[in-house]
Image: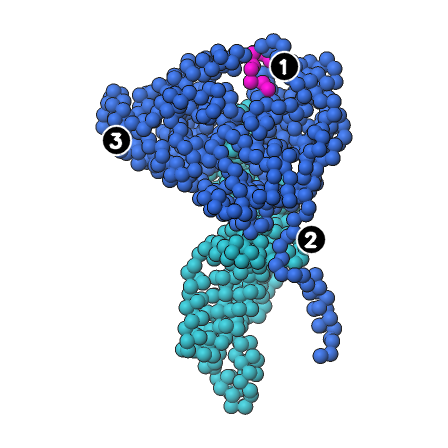
Chain colours: A blue, B cyan
């Protein structure tokens, strides 16, 4: 065959494709490939834009303290902390902590961060907490004294939040620029909506860490594709393992599942609607629900019933008796309805969302269980955005909600049951129980462990009687990975979404 | 002709303005506040003061008509605005993602032509045979099976069982051409599924029609070879309606790639549109819908102008 100009051109164009089949992207040595559940809408360090963003923030940034794998507090930018008085906390900064621009982390930097979070134009998630700070003293470059307006035993816990990261005040500003952090990895590049590439920060303050050379985070919005990507070897580690895939992952010797209960489902009420302002009715609803059916229907058996306030078993504040105070008891539910003057039940509605299967499935089980005691509920299943707005405005009767508390401390319950806070879709509407508000405030200000336990035991007893929310089910939250991934650990309970912090100790290969 | 063309252009501009106004109004009427949603990610309660601050910063506290006037004024300058989520310019996002969606559609169309035209021609030539019946039945099946089923099956077989292909994702062509084409294969096949069936059916019908025409009988009478008659007379005539239908379907695919992009993690225009609707990111929703509409309108305008140039009856109608 005589070579022609056309055939030569065609051969030239084909050269880049002359590679061996199959065509998989090869993993670079020491680089972990992480399958995210979504591409973070924003990784601004103080704004809450979801858990995928939180994982990325835990790689780039560090706060004063953080949560250790066992859930306890550990030092980060601060190597030690103590409370000098009920309203004063002192943090001693590490000498070798550096921002990724090479600047040393100083007490003035910490003050600048906290003041920015608290400022009037701030959109920081913890703005309210930052505004409880009366003043910040910086006696020297390594000492920060935080003085709060009220006694605040939980201040170090807030400082461990992934929304309270410390950034360099000298970070570049302007469109597209991101604050400079002091975490173990540096963001080297990103393909918007597709992937993020992070590289180890070689001057990270913990000797020998991070172990990985880098992390490539690829977003897989479809949960089934995320599992398929792990099984096909495209990624090494995935988050948000769908419940239906957990059994097959556990059965696969080439994969490992690390799952714990943490997030939970519950009901909130609009107390301004007929009947729902009556605690007996809310308690009747609590006793009418067979929670095992929710765990089975919505979570493929991956979870456990939640028959009290969401305080994790194993917590110092967990009481087995109080934790099962709303156990399934249809006879008790009917008796409470009769006592409240509606022996034959009533008609109401349940707001959930069709956008997330677990919300819809939970609502369907609740609807059936309520019907069994005479409460006829119509389901309303708009998209998530509409559901949030209806919840915030109190345009519902009963609503299904799923979330996790801020941390494993019972003060995290405030968001859910403190009726003095502004209306929100995460808590009941128009429902205030003054004693609960008093106990939450007392628990926040009490430094003695024993007295705190007594406060929260009383709070649980009152909550069981008043039912400001009704717990339904703990749901399992899982990460799956190949056996080559070492050192990564899923944190338990409410801290599950903090698991990304263990990536500084992870290795691959 | 010039006057007619100018009229068509004006009509197209009015159409685009109508779409822009309808989308702007509808997205603002749908319940859901962008500021609340952005600060409620992960099912948490946002600080009301932070929500109010964000609403002010995003301009959502202004009256609807003021927002609309501002939107039209920016649109007139070709500015689609910035995302409410991260301030990213929407035009940049569209210019980044639109080529990926168009590439997916083009790849699907190429596959549809490469498979549909030869198989459709062969089925017409073997009309009534087992081959004809089998291919027609397959085409019906391809049309009937939902695209997400085909997509999921492709992932299951080629990524999870055989491990020949990555499950999904995207690598820019400039970074790794081989990986790029590999990742394009399965979504292109999935998107080609329905088009193959359409092209097959149209080709078969058009070839059968051409085969019965006088010019084919004349060509045979002149003693031309069957291959020459098929290629130069039958297929060449049959292909015109096939390509017209293909062009129309490609237009509809602009809005129909959503599932394929989602199933295969292909970062085209559909994913940000879905996310923008969920988050009520008004400028992003309007920007993407408007882009798709402009493409539709432009495609139709070009087709109208071409038809009018070819057929004087249209412009005098």
Can residue B224 be seen here? The reply is yes
Q: Determine whether label 2 and label 3 are within 8 Å by CB.
A: no
Residue occupying image coordinates x 49% and y 12%: A450
The nearer-to-camera label among 1 and 3 is: 1
The nearer-to-camera label among 1 and 2 is: 1
Along the line of sight, the residue nearer the viewer: B268 or B5:
B268
Element at label 2: loop
The residue pinned by badge 3 equals: A374
The residue pinned by badge 2 equals: B175
Q: Position of residue B140 (x, y in %)?
A: 42, 65
Which stretch appears magenta? A147-156
Q: Determine whether label 1 and label 3 are within 8 Å by CB.
A: no
Along the line of sight, the residue nearer the viewer: A338 or B37:
A338
Which residue is most to the front? Answer: A253
Principal SS element in the magenta part?
A: loop
Residue occupying image coordinates x 54% and y 12%: A447
Q: Chain of mark 2?
A: B
Image quarter of residue A216: top right
Number of on-image labels: 3
Residue occupying image coordinates x 61% and y 48%: B94
Task: Identify the mark nearer the N-term, 1 or 3.
Answer: 1
Element at label 1: strand
The residue pinned by badge 1 equals: A82
Q: Quadrant of the N terminus of chain B?
A: bottom right
Q: Position of residue B156 (x, y in %)?
A: 50, 55
């Amino acid at each position: 065959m005589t070579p022609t100009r056309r055939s030569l051109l065609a051969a030239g164009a084909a050269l880049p494709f002359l590679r061996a089949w199959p065509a998989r992207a090869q993993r670079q040595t020491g680089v972990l490939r992480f399958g995210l559940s979504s591409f973070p809408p924003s990784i601004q360090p103080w704004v809450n834009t979801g858990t995928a963003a939180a994982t990325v923030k835990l790689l780039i940034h560090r706060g004063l303290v953080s949560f250790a794998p066992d859930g306890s507090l550990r030092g980060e930018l601060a190597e030690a902390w103590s409370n000098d008085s009920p309203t004063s906390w002192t943090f001693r900064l590490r000498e070798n902590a550096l921002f990724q621009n090479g600047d040393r982390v100083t007490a003035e930097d910490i003050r600048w961060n906290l003041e920015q979070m608290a400022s009037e134009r701030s959109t920081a998630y913890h703005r309210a907490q930052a505004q409880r700070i009366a003043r910040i003293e910086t006696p020297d470059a390594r000492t920060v004294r935080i003085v709060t307006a009220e006694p605040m035993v939980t201040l170090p816990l807030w400082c461990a939040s992934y929304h309270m990261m410390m950034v360099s005040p000298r970070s570049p500003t302007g469109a597209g620029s991101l604050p400079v952090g002091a975490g173990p990895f540096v963001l080297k590049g990103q393909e918007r909506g597709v992937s993020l590439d992070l590289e180890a920060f070689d001057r990270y303050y913990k000797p020998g860490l991070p172990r990985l050379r880098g992390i490539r985070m690829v977003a897989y919005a479809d949960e089934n594709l995320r599992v398929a990507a792990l099984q096909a070897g495209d990624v090494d580690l995935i988050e948000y393992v769908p419940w239906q895939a957990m059994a097959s992952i556990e059965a696969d010797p080439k994969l490992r599942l690390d799952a714990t209960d943490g997030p939970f489902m519950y009901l909130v009420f609009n107390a301004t609607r007929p009947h729902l302002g009556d605690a007996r009715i809310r308690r009747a609803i609590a006793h009418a629900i067979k929670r095992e059916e929710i765990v089975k229907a919505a979570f493929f058996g991956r979870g456990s019933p939640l028959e009290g306030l969401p305080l994790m078993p194993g917590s110092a504040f967990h009481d087995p008796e109080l934790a099962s105070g709303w156990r399934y008891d249809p006879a008790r539910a009917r008796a409470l309805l009769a006592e409240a003057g509606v022996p034959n039940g009533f008609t109401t509605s349940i707001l959930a969302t069709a956008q997330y299967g677990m919300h819809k499935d939970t609502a369907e089980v609740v609807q059936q269980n309520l019907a069994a005691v005479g409460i006829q509920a119509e389901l309303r299943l708009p998209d998530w955005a509409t559901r949030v707005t209806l919840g915030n405005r109190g345009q519902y009767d009963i609503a299904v909600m799923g979330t996790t508390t801020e941390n494993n401390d019972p003060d995290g319950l405030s968001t859910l049951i403190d009726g003095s806070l502004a209306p929100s879709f995460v808590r009941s509407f128009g429902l205030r129980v003054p004693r609960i508000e008093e106990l939450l405030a007392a628990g926040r200000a009490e430094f003695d462990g024993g007295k705190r336990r007594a406060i929260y035991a009383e709070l649980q007893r009152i909550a069981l009687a008043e039912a400001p929310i009704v717990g339904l089910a703990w749901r399992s939250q899982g990460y799956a990975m190949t056996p080559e991934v070492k050192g990564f650990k899923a944190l338990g309970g409410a801290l599950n979404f903090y698991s990304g912090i263990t990536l500084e100790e992870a290795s691959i290969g | 002709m010039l006057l007619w063309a100018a009229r068509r252009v004006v009509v197209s501009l009015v159409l685009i303005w109508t779409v822009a106004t309808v989308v702007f109004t509808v997205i603002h009427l749908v319940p859901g506040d962008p500021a609340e949603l952005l600060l409620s990610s992960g099912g948490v309660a946002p600080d009301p003061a932070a929500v109010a601050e964000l609403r002010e910063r995003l301009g959502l506290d202004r009256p609807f008509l003021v927002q609309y006037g501002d939107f039209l004024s920016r649109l007139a300058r070709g500015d689609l605005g910035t995302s409410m989520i991260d301030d990213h310019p929407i035009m940049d996002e569209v210019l980044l993602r639109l080529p990926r969606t168009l590439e997916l559609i083009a790849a699907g169309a190429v596959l549809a032509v490469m498979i549909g035209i030869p198989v459709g021609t062969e089925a017409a030539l073997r009309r009534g045979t087992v081959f004809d019946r089998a291919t027609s039945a397959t085409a019906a099946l391809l049309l009937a099976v939902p695209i997400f089923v085909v997509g999921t099956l492709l992932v299951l077989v080629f990524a999870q069982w055989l491990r020949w292909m990555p499950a999904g994702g995207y690598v820019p062509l400039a970074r790794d051409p081989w990986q790029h084409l590999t990742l394009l294969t399965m979504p292109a096949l999935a998107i080609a599924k329905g088009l193959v069936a359409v092209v097959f059916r149209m080709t078969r019908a058009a070839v059968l029609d051409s085969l019965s025409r006088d010019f084919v009988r004349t060509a045979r009478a002149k003693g031309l070879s069957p291959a020459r008659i098929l290629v130069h007379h039958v297929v060449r005539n049959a292909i015109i309606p096939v390509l017209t239908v293909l062009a129309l379907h490609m237009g509809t695919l602009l809005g129909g790639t959503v599932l394929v992009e989602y199933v295969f993690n292909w970062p085209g225009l559909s994913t940000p549109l879905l996310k923008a609707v969920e988050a009520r990111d008004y400028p992003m929703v309007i920007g993407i819908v408007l882009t798709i509409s402009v493409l539709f309108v432009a495609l139709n305008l070009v087709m109208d102008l071409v038809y009018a140039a070819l057929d004087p009856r249209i412009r005098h109608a």
